[in-house]
Image (cartoon, rainbow, N blue to C red):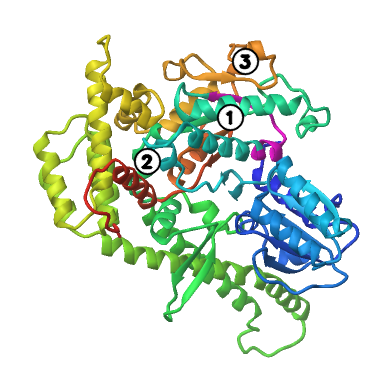
């Protein structure tokens, strides 16, 4: 059966909400217990896309609060805590237990609680003579947010900045890597799989792969470990491949404007945790959920916006036709004299009509929702010429350039400051070489539009360092500037160079999709020749070996982007999974899901840290 991360995480949460009792076929515990749920902000985000209020009610949760909220004592009721294992949360739990806020406490931590914190919890509750109120302590390994069946994020903010900050200390980098490894370990523990790990040499991807390999090895030595259910499979057909990448693999996809429905809704309307707020017809804000329960979103998320508009129209016409059909069938016999002979037939039609009403009502709700979203999107597209940005950026990447007149027309035309900044950066990285005069023209146009140039200057600096490195690649001595660039990127310059070259592929398949396809096929391929391989189940000496089972082919892959992912890459990988024969299964995850604007903000921050650009000004 294919790996389904959303289903697995939902099952774990259901078990936790039922006091970690076994769950029956209906998804609830055999004995219903009413309880209170306490969570922190991070765990609220984990629950939000998976459990709605009705789901909490189904599991006997009558009240739910944030841990930092001042709460009144509630007698005769157990409390389920779901929080990150932090000093702050432990302190708050000790206070709640000591003050006998609830009858007894079921403590669930989103990842493994470190021993010092466990000791603090024990001594704090012993001192107040209340330790007996703690029923159980569980490590849940759920420290990640699942947005769709095949999409997750670790919700690690500003990871790209932290990993690429030239002033970052080794210890700071190690802490970020440890945090990423902890999140990925939670994902693998929830899926109960030990994958073959593949990654490029150097940089954050190798650091994560190496530490994750060690963490899995250490854990597998424990007799009743989290993966013992999955059996000791050695064939790659039973085990997925985990492909780790660094955002520098391909910068353009994180910056570009995209005209497909899912990325457009995320970029323009700020989809967060599967929710967004849009202006309603009567002026107020309306909140919508867009997830796997919305059939239109699932079926049309990867279509270009004009196709989505056509599909909404088609669905609306089909709905009207079905409503007319119901009315026709239940509308009597057009005034003819009633003789009673068609009583059974009429009753049957009436019953069918009544039964079809809930389905018709639900369909209308979905159509209205997407009509409203599409209307708001259309307004933004017209005001900002988003179709023009998407089209011209795509052409730039295919042709490797743009006419100067066209370039200036875009920079001086419609669009927000951020739209223009993104376009300017796309111009910079889609051209292998740009005359200095053209760069100055773009800088001048950005100044005229009052755009903070820090992000542009940062990418320009990186590009010039690449050119220096390419020029001196054959010389024995490497200049200080190139060594500095390696420190800046935390990886080999050649890997970053590949990131620039990835923009220029003729068929314009995303670099990540091309590489994942090669890794899943397991055939010799120059693009992945240098990729490292780790098998946490193999003896230590053979890690990095080339056993045939480790090379693939693989039916399933978990693809993880360090430094921020996006809906464009997610869509591309899902299309790849369907296109391959036989069809494959690909889960995509990242440290955080970013819009183009949010990623450019991180580039700007790096530019400012390097003293590039002007004074910070919001690029809205």
Q: Is residue 192 magenta?
A: yes
The quadrant holding residue 91 is: bottom right
The residue to which callout 3 is attached is 543
The residue to which callout 1 is attached is 242
Q: Nearer the viewer, mark 3 or mark 2?
A: 3
Q: CA distance from mark 3 to mark 2?
A: 33 Å
As drawn, the residue found furthest toward the front would be 127
As drawn, the residue found furthest toward the top would be 476
Task: Please provide percent x and percent y for residue 496.
Answer: 35, 28
Q: CA distance from mark 2 to mark 1?
A: 21 Å
Judge whether 315 appears above or below 616 on screen. Answer: below
Q: Earlier in the sequence, mark 3 or mark 2?
A: 2
Q: Is residue 295 magenta?
A: no
Name the residue: 85% across, 72% down: 75
Q: Secondary structure at mark 1?
A: strand
Q: Earlier in the sequence, mark 2 or mark 1?
A: 1
Q: Which residues are magenta?
A: 186-198
Q: CA distance from mark 1 to mark 3?
A: 15 Å
Name the residue: 86% across, 66% down: 103
Task: Please provide percent x and percent y for residue 302.
Answer: 46, 48
Q: Which mark is residue 418?
A: none
The answer to whether marks 2 and 1 mark residues whose Cβ atoms lie closer than 8 Å is no
Looking at the figure, which quarter contains the N terminus? top right
Tag 1: Cα neighbours inside 10 Å, few (<14), some, or many (≥20)? Answer: many
The answer to whether marks 1 and 3 mark residues whose Cβ atoms lie closer than 8 Å is no
Horizontal arrangement in the rendering, residue 584 relative to residue 220 (left or right)? left
Looking at the figure, which quarter contains the C terminus? bottom left
Task: Please provide percent x and percent y for residue 146.
Answer: 60, 49
The residue to which callout 2 is attached is 253
Task: Please provide percent x and percent y for residue 300.
Answer: 49, 53
Horizontal arrangement in the rendering, residue 473 relative to residue 194 (left or right)? left
Q: Is residue 316 visible?
A: yes
């Amino acid at each position: 059966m294919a790996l389904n991360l959303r289903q697995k995480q939902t099952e774990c949460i259901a078990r936790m909400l039922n006091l970690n009792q076994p769950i029956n076929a209906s998804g609830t515990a055999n004995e219903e217990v009413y309880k209170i749920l306490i969570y922190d902000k991070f765990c609220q985000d984990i629950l939000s896309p998976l459990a709605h209020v009705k789901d909490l009610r189904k599991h006997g949760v009558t009240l739910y609060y944030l841990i930092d909220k001042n709460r009144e004592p509630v007698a005769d009721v157990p409390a389920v805590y779901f929080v990150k294992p932090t000093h702050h949360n432990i302190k708050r739990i000790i206070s709640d237990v000591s003050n006998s806020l609830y009858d007894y406490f079921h403590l669930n931590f989103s990842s493994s609680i470190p021993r010092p914190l466990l000791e603090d919890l024990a001594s704090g509750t012993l001192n107040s003579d209340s330790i007996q109120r703690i029923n159980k302590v569980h490590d849940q390994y759920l420290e990640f947010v699942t947005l769709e069946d095949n999409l997750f994020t670790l919700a690690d903010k500003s990871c790209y900045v932290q990993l690429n900050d030239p002033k970052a200390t080794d210890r700071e980098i190690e802490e970020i890597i440890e945090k990423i490894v902890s999140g990925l370990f939670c994902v693998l523990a929830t899926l109960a799989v030990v994958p073959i790990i593949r990654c490029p040499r150097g940089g954050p991807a190798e650091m994560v792969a190496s530490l994750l390999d060690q963490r899995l090895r250490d854990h597998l030595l424990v007799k009743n470990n989290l993966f013992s259910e999955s059996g000791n499979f050695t064939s790659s057909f039973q085990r997925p491949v985990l492909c780790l990448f660094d955002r520098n693999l391909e910068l353009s996809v994180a910056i570009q404007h995209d005209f497909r429905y899912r990325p457009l809704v995320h970029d323009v309307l700020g989809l967060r945790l599967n929710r967004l707020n849009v202006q309603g017809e009567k002026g107020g804000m309306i909140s919508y959920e867009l997830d796997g329960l919305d059939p239109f979103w699932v079926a049309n998320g990867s279509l270009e916006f004009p196709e989505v508009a056509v599909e909404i129209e088609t669905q609306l016409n089909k709905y009207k036709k079905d409503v007319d059909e119901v009315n026709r069938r239940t509308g009597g016999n057009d005034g003819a004299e009633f003789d009673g002979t068609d009583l059974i037939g009429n009753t049957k039609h009436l019953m069918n009509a009544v039964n079809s009403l809930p389905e018709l009502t639900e369909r209308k709700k979905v159509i209205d929702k997407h009509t409203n979203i599409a209307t708001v999107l259309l307004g933004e597209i017209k005001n900002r010429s988003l179709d023009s940005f998407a089209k011209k950026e795509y052409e730039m990447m295919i042709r490797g350039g743009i006419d100067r007149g066209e370039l200036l027309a875009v920079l001086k035309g419609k669009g927000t400051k951020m739209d223009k900044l993104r376009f300017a950066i796309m111009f910079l990285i889609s051209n292998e070489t740009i005359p200095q005069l053209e760069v100055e023209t773009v800088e001048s146009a950005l100044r005229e539009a009052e755009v903070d140039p820090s992000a542009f200057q940062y990418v320009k600096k990186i590009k010039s360092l690449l050119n220096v490195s390419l020029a001196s690649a054959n010389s024995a001595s490497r200049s200080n500037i190139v060594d500095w660039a390696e420190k800046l990127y935390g990886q080999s310059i050649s890997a970053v160079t590949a990131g620039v070259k990835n923009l220029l592929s003729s068929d314009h398949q995303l670099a990540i999709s091309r590489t994942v396809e090669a890794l899943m096929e397991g055939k010799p391929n120059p693009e992945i020749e240098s990729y490292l391989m780790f098998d946490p189940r193999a003896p230590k000496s053979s890690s990095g070996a080339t056993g045939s089972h480790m090379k693939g082919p693989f039916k399933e892959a978990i693809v993880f982007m360090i430094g921020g992912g996006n809906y464009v890459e997610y869509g591309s990988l899902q299309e790849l999974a369907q296109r391959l024969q036989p069809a494959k299964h690909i889960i995509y995850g990242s440290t955080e899901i970013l819009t183009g604007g949010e990623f450019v903000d991180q580039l700007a921050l790096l530019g400012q840290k390097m003293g590039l650009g002007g004074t910070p000004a919001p690029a809205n």
